[in-house]
Image (tube, helix red, strand yellow):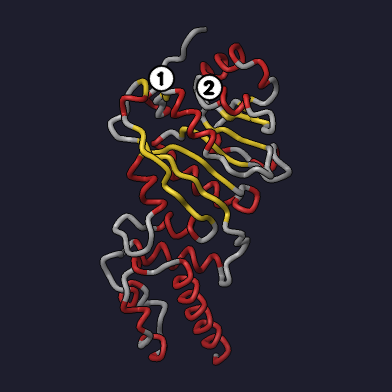
Amino acid sequence: MTTVRAKKNLGQHFLKDKDIAQKIVESLQASNVNKVLEIGPGMGVLTQFLLQNKSYETTVVEIDRESVEYLNVHFPELKERIISDDFLKLNLHDYFGEPFVLIGNFPYNISSQIFFKVLEYRNQIPEIVGMLQKEVAERLAAPPGSKAYGILSVFLQAYYHIEYLFTVNQDQFNPPPKVKGGVIRLTHNQTEHLDCDERLFKSIVKMAFNQRRKTMRNSLKSMITSDELKANPIFDKRPEQLGVAEFVSLVKMIGKQAGNSDQSQ
């Protein structure tokens, strides 16, 4: 087998430029972690450079059976480290009992889902380097106050420092996608757990951004009942104006109010 046919339903766009592939691999910085998991290797344009680095023990996960066959033929050194499965359905604890880093030219159509899964394993994944749709990459790295800043920006920035590294043009892929790619690096910020109720944090962030044109006072009016809380100026802001620390502070205030309410009953 000399090539793999790109499949539209899998969102496959194979990176052609080896210099860019090498640049992506060299963007990994987690020098104290040697376990690497590549998502969607396709024909191995990133894989070849990962395997050249002898300090890495590289595993790949690929849903496309044709790509798996290609990898088995062209990268026999991977041996038993090709997982022929859907990354989104994997229990990663079955494959990694220690920290590992993620890398990949992520399928654009599931990139957000990949990062929601990353959050489930965040304390085991110290670093991620990936290419995704430029607009999505910019959204994840966007700071508070930006129009691009949203739900997944907050969730990821709660646990990771995110850097937008560089842009890749459409003509560097086969077949070329309709949009440019953006490469980002996420580095764990050592936060294992937020200093608040994390389930409530998720609920409040989602509730706020689902009504992002409204102030926090209006979008969360069902959750803020005390006059003291209503008067707090943080509720005059819109969700994109709040950083992670401010969301944590807000969640603690609402949680405390709920606790006081329970005690008074």
* Horizontal and vertical percent position of residue 98: 72, 44
59 and 190: which is toward the camera: 190
Residue position for label 1:
6
Kind of residue at disc 2: Gly
Q: Does label 2 or label 1 sit earlier along the sequence? A: 1
> Splitting the image into 4 quarters, where does residue 49 fall?
top right
Q: Looking at the image, which residue is at 51% across and 68% down?
A: 200
The residue tagged with tag 1: helix, strand or loop?
Answer: loop
Residue 77, which numbered label?
none
Q: Indicate the position of residue 191 as horizontal and vertical percent values.
A: 60, 62
Q: Where in the figure is residue 23, as x and y percent of width and height?
A: 48, 33
Of all residues, the one furthest to the left in this rendering is 213
Binning the other alpha carbons within 10 Å of mark 2 as few (below 14), some (14 to 19) or many (20 upward) gives: many
Q: Is residue 39 above or below residue 118?
A: above
- The residue located at (35%, 58%) in the rendering is 149
Percent position of residue 253, x then y: 49, 81
